[in-house]
Image (cartoon, grey):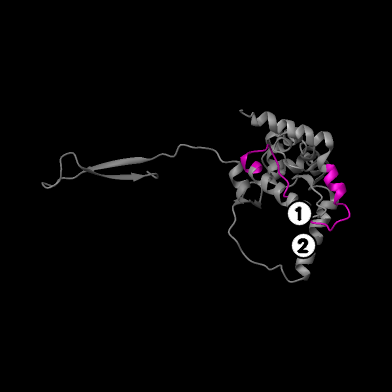
Amino acid sequence: MSINFPKTEEEILHFWKHIKAFETQLDLTRDGPRFTFYDGPPFGLPHYGHLLASTIKDIIPRYWSMKGYHVVRRFGWDTHGLPVEHEINKKLQISSGEAVMQMGIENYNAECRAIVMKYSNEWRQVIERLGRWIDFDNDYKSMDVTFMESCWWVFKQLYDNGHVYRAYQIMPFSTALGTPLSHMEEKQNEKPTVDPAVVVAFPVLDIYSQENTSLLIYTTTP
């Protein structure tokens, strides 16, 4: 007999949803010790990198759940940083801090907040189809005050215990935005371009060399 794997997967997902497998597993471990798993929230549409990491982010909580730990798994949304601003700048066709100030920071922030859940349906569909157990209905957003306060609390614990130090690192920098860029952010606005190049041929005038032999010089900065 042959098996239709996609259909079988969909049947299993339907069964899990019918018996509320994820919710039941949380109820059964509610009185057990807690295991906290920090899941970095995504932004934009899901891609292969997200899917690969999601399998790992699902395996670890499942493992500790099977050992009797209570593992709360809430889906999160990254609402800070340049990726959100980049989308809004394209929408509003602005490219400078002066334009943001003219528009008003409050109005600009409102525009940013409005696209936070732009791809929520796509994420729910993909992650559920992947078979990952996670709570979409009780999600969090990095712009929530409680989330930001928890990050500062964690940082203070690290600082108080002597785990924070000052160092220097070479970073990409946006002169337009006036801020350092992460490696992901610097690649976000990459555009292919044609780089002029010149190849110069110098025939070899030597009685011992083969005919039609030349030395080539290649340069991209003619």
Q: Nearer the viewer, mark 2 or mark 1?
A: 1
The residue at 63%/44% (across/down) is 52
Magenta residues? 23-51
Q: Indicate the position of residue 78 as horizontal and vertical percent values.
A: 74, 45
Name which residue type carries label 2.
Phe
Residue sitting nearer the eye, 199 or 13 = 13
Which residue position is annotated with label 1? 64
Residue sitting nearer the eye, 19 or 123 = 19
Q: Indicate the position of residue 185 as horizontal and vertical percent values.
A: 63, 46
Q: Residue 37 colored magenta?
A: yes
Name which residue type carries label 1.
Trp
Which residue position is annotated with label 2? 155
The residue at 62%/43% (across/down) is 49
Quadrant in the picture for residue 19: top right
The residue at 71%/35% (across/down) is 129
Quadrant in the picture for residue 165: bottom right
Q: Indicate the position of residue 218 as horizontal and vertical percent values.
A: 33, 44
Quadrant in the picture for residue 135: top right
**Residue found at the far front of this picture:** 1
